[in-house]
Image (cartoon, rainbow, N blue to C red):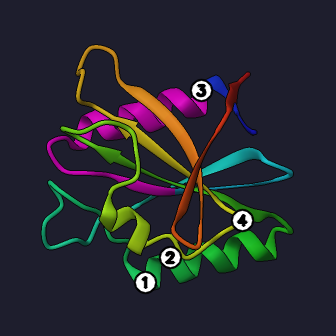
Amino acid sequence: MLIIKKEFRDEIIKHARLASPSEVCGILSGGGGKADKIYKMKNTSDKPEICYFMDPKEQLQVMKEIRSSGKEMVGIYHSHTESEAYPSARDLELAFYPDAYYIIISLKDKKNPSIRAFRIVEGKISEEEIITK
């Protein structure tokens, strides 16, 4: 179960809406399945309208900051602008962190975006509950 503040949920959705039709991506830090900080990352994909890729230098910098603050990476989020909030084949290829939640925001229904969380371990997908407080 992922616990996330309502303001963080709203901020992630806003991030996705503002960048559409490009996908967005970011990292959530915290501990114990609870997110306490959002890092909005730059999508450096050569096809940002259909996939995301974080800048490796920016990602390394964020990971160092998270570690130095005594926190952990709780999750990675990104958006799908035209498809459901479910991991794509490309998302499975990029799932390098089995302990992280993979949060996907779908803008398929522009008026009512959906947000879902998953664990991806060795190519197997399991949906996880998101608790918004």
Of the two numbered discs 1 and 4 in the rendering, the one whose residue sits closer to the viewer: 4
Q: Residue at x 33, y 71 (%)?
A: 53
Q: Is residue 59 left or right of residue 70?
A: left
Region in magenta:
7-26
Residue under label 3? 7
Mark found first going from the N terminus, 1 or 3:
3
Q: Is residue 36 above or below residue 55?
A: above
**Secondary structure found at label 1:** helix
Q: Mark 4 is on which residue type?
A: Asp
Disc marking residue 99: 4
Residue 113's x, y, as percent? 35, 24
Q: CA distance from mark 1 to mark 2?
A: 5 Å
In primary-sequence order, the first of circles 4 and 3 is 3
Can you give x and y, in whole percent of width and height, for residue 12 in the image? 46, 38
Q: In this image, 90 relative to 10: left or right?
A: left
Q: Residue at x 67, y 80 (%)?
A: 64
Badge 2: how crowded within 10 Å, few (<14), some, or many (20+)?
some
Describe the element under mark 3 as helix, strand or loop.
Answer: helix
Residue 49 falls within the magenta-colored stretch = no
- Asked if disc 1 and disc 2 are in contact, CB closer than 8 Å, the reply is yes
Asked whether the residues under the numbered discs 4 and 2 touch, taking CB atoms below 8 Å apart as contact, a structural biologist would say no
Q: Residues within 10 Å of mark 4 (few under 14, many from 20)?
A: few
Q: Say which quadrant the N terminus sits in.
A: top right
Label 1 neighbour load within 10 Å: few <14, some 14-19, many 20+: few
